[in-house]
Image (cartoon, grey):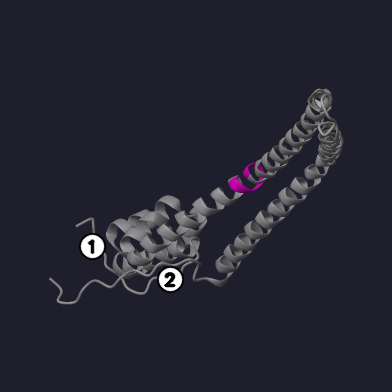
Amino acid sequence: MSPYPPRRTPLLFYAERFRRRVLQVLADLAVLVWAVLVVSAAVALHDLVLTLQAPGRGLSEAGERVRGAFGGAAEAAGGVPFVGDRLAGAFTPGTDAGTSLVDAGQAQIEAVAAIATGLAWLVVVVAAVPVVLVWLWLRLRWILRARHAVAARDQDVDLLALRALTRGSPGRVRRAAGPSGDAAGAWRRGELPVLIRLADVELARMGLRGATSVTSAPGRDG
């Protein structure tokens, strides 16, 4: 057992190779710009729909004036001796009508506000959330795979070579095998130079630098 603790595998958020890293940064910026545009469009739509509250406000203001007029008349009539109560009661329907207009206007204002908020959220959910979720899933998947690949690069290049055989481009795999082109046979025999080149194929596919050390089993045919 080694007296030294195992070296902790770093967590990479971006590729080590320049080209892949640039593509990742551009993808992140594209998602950010798209999210900002969608949110801005949702806010603009929300504000546009809120302009439909104008009739409701007008109705509510008219109701306030009607209610105030009849309320003032009822208060004045209430001061008439002997018949003040009856005169004030005659103005009650007008006051109630004004209250009804105010309530109707407020209900319309609240309904338009609810529709505006709902439409804004619908735009965000439909246009932005799926894009962000797919981007987040792809980024997390790459980060986890890159972490395992970096650990294998330092400890088990043999495993990376096997991944290259099963996932890599056939043309690149054959070129990594050398003149013979027998990449699978070279892997079975544990040929060190071929293992390193195959590992580099897998690492390059993920945008990572080439292998720095090798831990592989001896020849498999023996």
What residue is shown at x 60% (from left), y 64% (from top)? 23
In the picture, the disc for residue 190 is none
Quadrant of the frame with the N terminus: bottom left
x and y percent of residue 22 in the render?
A: 60, 68
Residue 182 visible? The answer is: no
What residue is shown at x 68% (from left), y 59% (from top)? 33
C-beta proximity under 8 Å, tags 1 and 2: no
What residue is shown at x 29% (from left), y 68% (from top)? 155
Quadrant of the frame with the C terminus: bottom left
Q: How many marks?
A: 2
For disc 1, the marked residue is: 217
x and y percent of residue 65 in the render?
A: 86, 38
Instruction: State the extent of the magenta-drawn residues as a range.
Output: 125-129
Is residue 8 highlighted in magenta? no
Characterize the local packing of mark 1: few (<14), some (14-19) or many (20 or more) Cα atoms within 10 angstroms: few
Quarter of the figure with residue 213:
bottom left
Tell me the amino acid under the disc marked 2: Gly
In the picture, the disc for residue 210 is 2
Query: Which of the two residues, 6 or 215, is positioned nearer the viewer here?
Result: 6
Query: Which of the two residues, 175 or 53, is positioned nearer the viewer here?
Result: 53
- Report the mark closest to the observer, 1 or 2: 2
x and y percent of residue 72 in the render?
A: 84, 37
Q: Main secondary structure of the magenta part?
A: helix
Residue 32 falls left or right of residue 138: right
Which element type, helix, strand or loop, lies under badge 2? Answer: loop
Residue 75 falls left or right of residue 7: right
Residue 148 visible? The answer is: yes
- Up/down of 27 relative to 103, above or below: below
Is residue 126 highlighted in magenta? yes
Q: Earlier in the sequence, mark 1 or mark 2?
A: 2
Tell me the amino acid under the disc marked 1: Ala
x and y percent of residue 71 in the render?
A: 81, 35
